[in-house]
């Protein structure tokens, strides 16, 4: 009797084990598709965010790193000569906002067509600008020097308003604002609520990521355009200074024409359309718009004081 009982328990245990194993195998097979879908969905979401926000977040992080330790970041660049330094510091002293560690010469500025730039505690000069200021100081050419006095006032406006830190903030926050805005708009559009297949829902993450990246990029440049125009607006109400800044903008525009339309193959209308299109991806307003606003200020100053007519153009 005892042997029969043992055999019965053994058989029951074997049957239970087989049944449990069979159920586990069935559970694994049932869960496998769900697990695979989850991995695929997570991967596509990761790629989506990398495309939509990766470059903006990286740019923000790199710029923040530079601003937090400007001295180390710019130490490989040569300092300007003492005469250039004295000229720049004396110009900035009139704005009551100096706080400059050094004036640096940046060779890459010539390549990118940037005459002058700024960090929070450094002024950056293109080698061409450095040479022009040296020559003007040697000959006491006030017309040329006024070009760079006005540009220094423009650049100093960026420092006063902490524009570079605001650009870092824009780099970091705009991708998330874009994502939230697109989500709100999508939920508000009935056709966007249409149920898609799993594959369609995942694959659409790629084109929407590029769309969000485009929105974020244009938004960042819009912020920067506002900063640049404000910097123009804060140049002194002095005809010599305004004419000086206008000269810089006109010279830059001539360089752009040579670059984008070297053989004059484009008609004025085609060139205008090209520059307007490219301006969505530029940090500065259109040069002609900036020049127009400077002309309006110059005309107003002349009307207010006939004595200003003696200004040399």
Image (tube, rainbow, N blue to C red):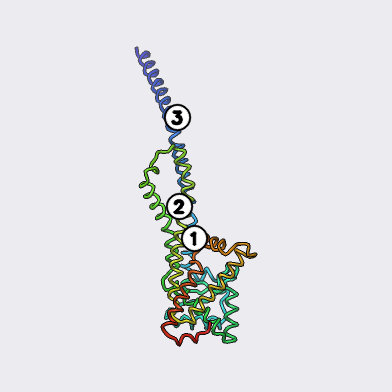
Q: CA distance from mark 1 to mark 3?
A: 52 Å
- Viewer-side residue, 128 vs 20: 128
Q: Residues within 10 Å of mark 2 (few under 14, many from 20)?
A: many
Q: Quadrant of the N terminus?
A: top left
Q: For mark 1, what is the residue?
A: 280
Q: Position of residue 308 (x, y in %)?
A: 46, 85
Vertically, is 289 above or below 186?
below
Query: Which mark sits nearer the N-terminus, 1 or 3?
Result: 3
Q: Residues within 10 Å of mark 3 (few under 14, many from 20)?
A: few
Q: For mark 3, what is the residue?
A: 29
Q: CA distance from mark 1 to mark 2?
A: 15 Å
Q: Secondary structure at mark 2?
A: helix
Q: Looking at this view, name the residue that lies furthest to the top.
A: 1
Vertically, is 34 above or below 215?
above
Residue name at image x 46 percent, y 69 percent: 228
Q: Position of residue 6 (x, y in %)?
A: 37, 17
Residue name at image x 39 percent, y 42 percent: 191
Query: Which mark sits nearer the N-terminus, 1 or 2?
Result: 2
Q: For mark 2, what is the residue?
A: 212
Q: Position of residue 22 (x, y in %)?
A: 42, 24
Q: Secondary structure at mark 3?
A: helix
Q: Residues within 10 Å of mark 1 (few under 14, many from 20)?
A: some
Query: Which mark sits nearer the N-terminus, 2 or 3?
Result: 3
């Amino acid at each position: 009797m005892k042997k029969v009982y043992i055999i019965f328990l053994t058989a029951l245990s074997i049957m239970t084990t087989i049944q449990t194993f069979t159920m586990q195998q069935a559970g694994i097979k049932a869960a496998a598709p769900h697990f695979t879908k989850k991995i695929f969905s997570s991967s596509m979401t990761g790629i989506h965010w990398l495309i939509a926000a990766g470059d903006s977040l990286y740019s923000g992080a790199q710029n923040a790193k530079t601003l937090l330790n400007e001295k180390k970041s710019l130490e490989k660049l040569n300092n300007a000569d003492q005469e250039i330094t004295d000229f720049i510091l004396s110009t900035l002293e009139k704005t009551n906002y100096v706080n400059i560690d050094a004036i640096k010469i940046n060779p890459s500025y010539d390549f990118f067509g940037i005459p002058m730039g700024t960090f929070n505690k450094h002024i950056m000069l293109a080698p061409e600008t450095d040479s022009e200021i040296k020559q003007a100081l040697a000959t006491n050419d006030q017309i040329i020097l006024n070009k760079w006095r006005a540009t220094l006032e423009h650049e100093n406006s960026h420092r006063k308003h902490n524009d570079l830190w605001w650009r870092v903030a824009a780099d970091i926050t705009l991708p998330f604002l874009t994502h939230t805005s697109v989500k709100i708009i999508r939920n508000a559009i009935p056709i966007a609520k249409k149920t898609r297949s799993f594959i369609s829902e995942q694959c659409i993450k790629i084109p929407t990521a590029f769309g969000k990246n485009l929105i974020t990029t244009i938004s960042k440049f819009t912020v920067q355009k506002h900063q640049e125009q404000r910097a123009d607006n804060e140049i002194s109400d002095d005809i010599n200074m305004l004419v000086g800044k206008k000269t810089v903008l006109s010279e830059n525009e001539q360089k752009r024409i040579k670059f984008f339309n070297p053989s004059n193959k484009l008609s004025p209308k085609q060139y205008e359309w090209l520059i307007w299109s490219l301006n969505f991806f530029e940090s500065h307003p259109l040069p002609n718009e900036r020049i127009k606003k400077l002309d309006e200020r110059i005309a107003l100053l002349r009307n207010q004081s006939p004595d200003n007519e003696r200004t040399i153009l």
